[in-house]
Image (cartoon, rainbow, N blue to C red):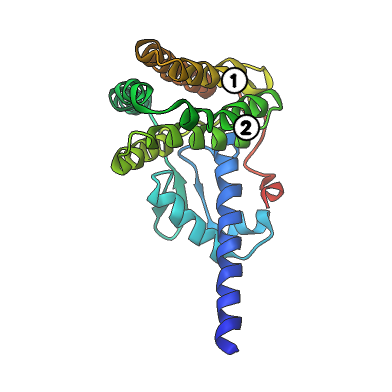
Amino acid sequence: MGDLKQHSLIKAQERLRDQVGHALRAALIAGELRPGSVYSAPGLAAELGVSATPVREAMLDLAREGLVEPVRNKGFRITEVSERDLDQYTELRTMIEVPTIGRIAKIATAEQLEELRPIAEEIVTSAREHNLIGYLEADRRFHLSLLALAGNDRLVETVGDLRKRSRLYGLTGLDEAGKLVSSAEEHIELLDLMIAGDAEAAEACMVRHLGHVRSLWAQGRDEPVGRTPGGLGSGL
């Protein structure tokens, strides 16, 4: 029975690590953890009300995603993403996703595409309800699930990595202004075009959508952030 208890303890630790990771991602997106700043695991742990161990583990997960980088004897620095970086990530995504969307529009069944409609609607609902974390999570699921219909796991993996590295943060002001709703509605438009089998129009919609996202990100960098690096405790 001792082994089972140990197994349960490991599972509990994993769940806490995941919860801490979610809270830190939320803080990154909301702009509470600022690019270029260094944060210590004990300091973040104190704000989150947990021990330093799950915070370190979660930060190492974020480091593998390129969101933070370890700073010896100090903690973790939030990775800065330059305009040039984002332009390059957007260019790569355009090169990969646009033709893939056109191909999927030709080979996927209406039933396969319709299965993604609830996620597209969830994106719109999250944007309207100012649920930025829910918006980005649903957006991730929609795009990666859609690309998965091409049958290329490595392609999905590559786009997933590009999305992580070009993550959106500091968009609280845009969300509150309702500027994310139009971007959210493009998911439903894209889905309708693909179901109609209009590959050319679907590709054009995807180009516009990626450009829209790029524009929103650039605007978000200039938005004043209404919160300070405190207040992370609500993430757990």
Q: Amino acid at mark 1?
A: Leu
Residue 29 percent across, percent down from the top left: 56, 36
What secondary structure is marked by label 1?
loop
Drawn side of residue 160 relative to residue 184, left or right:
left
Tell me the residue that label 2 is attached to: 132
Disc 2 residue type (three-letter): Leu
Image coordinates of residue 218 in percent, x first then y, are: 47, 20
Give the residue displayed 61% in from the left and 62% down from the top: 16
Q: Position of residue 225 (x, y in %)?
A: 62, 28
Q: Based on the displayed image, in which of its 4 quarters is residue 208 positioned?
A: top left
| Residue positioned 67% across, 34% down in the render | 227
Residue at (61%, 37%) from the top-left corner?
133
In front here: 140 or 189?
Answer: 189
Rounded to the nearest whole Å, what is the CA distance between mark 1 and mark 2? Answer: 9 Å
Element marked by disc 2: helix
Viewer-closest of 122 and 174: 122
Question: Crowding near pointer 2: few (<14 within 10 Å), some, many (20+)?
Answer: many
Quarter where residue 173 is shown = top right
106 up-or-down from 17: above or below: above
Is residue 218 toward the left or the right of residue 86 in the image? right
- Badges 1 and 2: C-beta atoms under 8 Å apart? yes
Instruction: Using a 10 Å C-alpha cutoff, classify the residue at mark 1 as few (fewer than 14 neighbours), some (14 to 19) or many (20 or more).
Output: many
Where is mark 1, residue-wise? 180
Please tell me which of labels 1 and 2 falls first in the chain: 2
Q: Quadrant of residue 230?
A: top right
Q: Quadrant of the N terminus?
A: bottom right
